[in-house]
Each structure stands twice: as C-alpha cells, then as structure tokens.
C-alpha cells in the first residue's frame, strides 16, 4: 500500500493515538526521546525501504538531499544511514534476504504506518494551532489578561500610570477588529497592515512625547515587585504572540499579521525598558526610564517607516518575504544549515543545489507532512534561492567557475550547526527517566515567581528603603 493509499484510508477518529495505546508504546520504543517520528531520520530510512528502496547504496543516495524543518540535524550523511541500518537490524525492524536485499519486518512496516498516521494526525492539529482564528483568539485573551492584571495592580497600589496602561491594553483589541474586518472579511490586507503600522507609529510619537516631558520634568518612580511581575508576564505573553503571529503570518501569507507581529515586538521592547527604568529608580535615578522610552520609539519609527515605504513603493503583488519577522529565524536557520552543509559535502552548482533541495523537501513532505516545511506551504526553490543569494552576499559562500564553495565564515557556521546537532542528538538518546536542566530551570522559575508574590509587601518595603 503506497503512502497515497495510506492517506486515502486515513481517519482521525480511527488513527488518533492515545498515550496508553500499543501504537504509542511502539513509537516510544523506537523513538525514545520524545516519542515522535519527526525528531529523527530513522523513520525516513524505514519509509524509503517501505517504498521499495532495498539496497544500502540506493538508500544513501535517496536520503542525502532529504530536508526536514522540524529537526536540528544539518544533513543525512552516509554514516547516518549506516547507523539507521544497524539500529533497524538490531531491533529487527528490517531483515536481509539471501541476495542482500533489505526488507521491512512486520513490526517495521507497522511502525512506518503508525508513524505516518501520527504525522497526519499531529499535523492536522498543528495547522489548527497555527491558524488565523487561533492567533486572533490568543491575542484577545492575552490582552484581556494583561489589562486585568494592570488595572487590579493599579487600584491596589493607587498607581494612575498602571491603570492608564491597563486601559490602553484594552484599546489594543481594536487592532484585532481591524484585522478581522479589513483583512479576513474585506480581503484588504494591505489597508489593514497600513492602519496597524500607523497605530504603531502613533504609539512611537506618544513614547517620544512622554519621554521628553519626563526628561524636562522628571517624576519619582516608585518601584514595586508587582510592577516587575507584570513586566515579566508582559514579556512572556508578548513573546508568545510574537512567535505565533509571525508564524501564522508567514504560513498563511497574511500581511496584516506580519505587521501586527511587529507590534508584539514593540510591546516586548517597552516592557524591557520599563523593567530597566524600575531598576534604576531603586537608586533614585529616574531619567533612564525616559531615555529608554525615546530609544524604543526611534526603533519603532525605523521599523514602521521601512515597512510603509515597501508597502507604498510596490503597487503590484507585495513581496511578503521583504518583511522580516521572528519566525524567519526558524526557516533561515534550517536553510542555512542545509545549504552550507550541502556545499561542504560535495561540489555543487546553484542549479544542482536547488534541485537537491526540491527533491529533499518533496520527500520530506510525503513522509513528515507539515513537519517537513513546518507548515509553510510557500517554502520552495524561490525561498531557498533568495536565502542562497543572501549567503553569497554575506560572504558565507563564494562561487568559482559556477561551483559553490564555503568561505572561512561559512565553515564556522557549519561547525556551529553541527555542534548544535550533536548536542540535540545526544539529548535525544534516552537513558531512563531523568530530570533535565530545562525542567530544573522551569521549576526554579515557578518557585521564585510564587515566592515573589507571597513576599511582595516585604520586598516593596525593602525597595522603598533605598
């Protein structure tokens, strides 16, 4: 049964895998780190055998160009394929016939089908998560949470500034209405983007005005632990929105969401500035808060004006890739590693490199579904070529007689990517239950946060003693 037939026979109700099912236990056995097939290329190795590629040399050739955005592995090397071969043989996922042909065992075939259905199942819900409706609901929820926190804290502390900020966050809900009305309903994506950037520039003007007023007539700032907590929560929530808006904007090609992700970036900068200003205020240094506000406003203007110039300069189809957003880091990091790794491995022309990428991405999409391009359907030769040109201009790669070569700068990037890959692969080797540094850090952060809330009055008294 081909993968096309497997997809035709797929049903979410039938193929949904619970953590107690035998199917999940099978994946846990062979994908021990996170129990997910998209975390490694062993699954791809089995998929190629499933499709009839039953010689080790042919498997190496097929897997060399494979591209998966959801993994930190730079490339699939011949040594990797030999590792997968030995592992699959040891675990009896494959068998070797008398004439040397590689074939899947019954359990190996079951693992391929279960993993493929799991990728289909997970990709479906990931697409819902990375949808325009989800990002709008998340934005509204986060704004309401922040507003309530700031209003309640402002009432408790008698802080008019905090109350004002809380009500201003509520007015940000207008942006959601603008995106829904102009972008989703009326399909006026560029108009919605212009309005959002305009509102962002207005915020910048307000920051400059209030910053100049504070410099000319500085008012004492009373630092409180509640203000620090709200600042930290604001950074965390806005960072989540920044990632979600930029991802969904890039995936869906929605210009207004890409523009709105810039607003989330602005809110993070403002919150960081507030925390720095509060820290200096402990030592009765109040002008720093105003200076940071002005600097943030200037950065806002640079971003906003740049985007507006692009929008008004191009009357035809706007090139969405010209707006740089946070989510680009994910794709650019993987593309950089893939391109540089490919060039380091063998002599390639631009045409051959892009052809390999196209084949590798097609195979990845077949086996890994949305995890191959991380739900960015426009990822392809056009995007890869633009990124390759940036690497050439950045002096990571040079071209001689039509052949691509790495510079010393590019070689350094390659080894850093390999360092990250080996670190991740080492972590993915399960050695029984263990508490990772990430888990310890999360526990300590939560405990510290709870202690700050409990002892807030005492800490405020200490802060006021300076």
Image: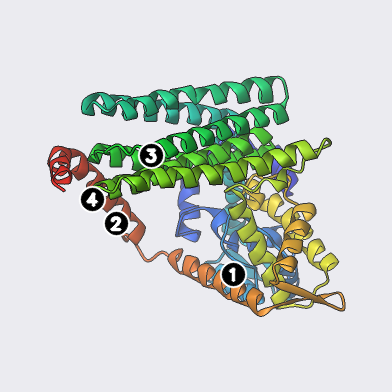
Judge by depth and name the residue closer to the eye, 222 or 87. 222
Placement of 177 over or under 315, stated as above or below: above
Q: Earlier in the sequence, mark 2 or mark 3?
A: 3
Judge by depth and name the residue closer to the eye, 343 or 154. 154
Q: State the CA–CA distance, disc 2 to disc 3.
A: 46 Å
Q: Give the structural element (helix, strand or loop) at label 1.
A: helix
The reply to whether residue 180 is in sight is yes
Can you tell which of label 2 and label 4 is closer to the viewer? 4
Judge by depth and name the residue closer to the eye, 210 or 227. 210
- Mark 1 is surrounded, within 10 Å at the Cα level, by few (under 14), some (14 to 19) or many (20 or more) other residues, namely some
Q: State the CA–CA distance, disc 3 to disc 4.
A: 19 Å
Q: Give the structural element (helix, strand or loop) at label 4.
A: loop
Q: Earlier in the sequence, mark 3 or mark 1?
A: 1
What residue does disc 2 label?
440
What residue does disc 3 label?
216
What residue does disc 4 label?
283
- Mark 4 is surrounded, within 10 Å at the Cα level, by few (under 14), some (14 to 19) or many (20 or more) other residues, namely few
What residue does disc 1 label?
84
């Amino acid at each position: 049964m081909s993968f096309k037939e497997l997809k035709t026979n797929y049903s979410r109700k039938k193929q949904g895998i619970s953590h107690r099912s035998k199917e999940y236990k099978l994946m846990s056995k062979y994908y021990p780190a996170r129990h997910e097939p998209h975390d490694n290329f062993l699954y791809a190795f089995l998929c190629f055998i499933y499709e009839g590629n039953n010689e080790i040399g042919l498997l190496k050739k097929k897997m060399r160009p494979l591209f998966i955005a959801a993994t930190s592995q730079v490339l699939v090397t011949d040594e990797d394929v030999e590792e997968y071969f030995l592992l699959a043989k040891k675990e009896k996922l494959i068998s070797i016939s008398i004439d040397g042909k590689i074939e899947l065992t019954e359990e190996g075939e079951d693992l391929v089908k279960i993993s493929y259905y799991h990728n289909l199942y997970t990709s479906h819900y990931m697409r819902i998560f990375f949808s325009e409706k989800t990002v709008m609901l998340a934005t509204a929820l986060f704004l309401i949470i922040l507003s309530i926190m700031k209003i309640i804290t402002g009432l408790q502390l008698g802080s008019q500034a905090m109350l004002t900020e809380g009500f201003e966050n509520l007015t940000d809900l207008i942006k959601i209405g603008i995106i829904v009305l102009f972008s989703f309903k009326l399909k006026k994506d560029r108009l919605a983007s212009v309005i959002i950037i305009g509102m962002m520039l207005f915020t910048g003007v307000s920051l400059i005005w209030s910053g100049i007023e504070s410099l000319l007539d500085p008012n004492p700032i009373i630092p409180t632990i509640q203000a620090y907590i709200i600042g930290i929560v604001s950074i965390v929530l806005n960072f989540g929105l920044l990632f979600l808006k930029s991802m969904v904007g890039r995936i869906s090609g929605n210009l207004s969401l890409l523009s709105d992700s810039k607003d989330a970036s602005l809110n993070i900068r403002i919150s960081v500035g507030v925390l720095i200003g509060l820290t200096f205020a402990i030592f009765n240094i109040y002008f720093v808060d105003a200076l940071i506000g002005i600097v943030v406003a200037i950065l806002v203007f640079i971003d906003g004006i740049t985007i507006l110039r692009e929008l008004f300069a191009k009357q035809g189809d706007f090139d969405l890739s010209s707006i740089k957003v946070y989510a680009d880091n994910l794709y650019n990091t993987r593309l950089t590693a893939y391109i540089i790794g490919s060039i380091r491995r063998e002599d390639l022309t631009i045409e051959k490199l892009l052809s390999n990428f196209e084949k590798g991405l097609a195979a990845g999409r077949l086996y890994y579904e949305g995890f191959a391009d991380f739900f960015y359907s426009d990822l392809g030769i056009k995007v890869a070529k633009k990124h390759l040109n940036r690497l050439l201009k950045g002096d990571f790669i040079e071209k001689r007689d039509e052949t691509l070569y790495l510079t010393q700068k590019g070689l350094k990037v390659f080894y850093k990517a390999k360092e990250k890959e080996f670190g991740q692969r080492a972590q993915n080797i399960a050695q029984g239950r263990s508490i990772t540094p990430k888990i310890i850090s999360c526990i300590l952060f939560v405990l510290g946060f709870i202690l700050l809330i409990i002892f807030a009055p005492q800490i405020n008294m200490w802060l006021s003693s300076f």
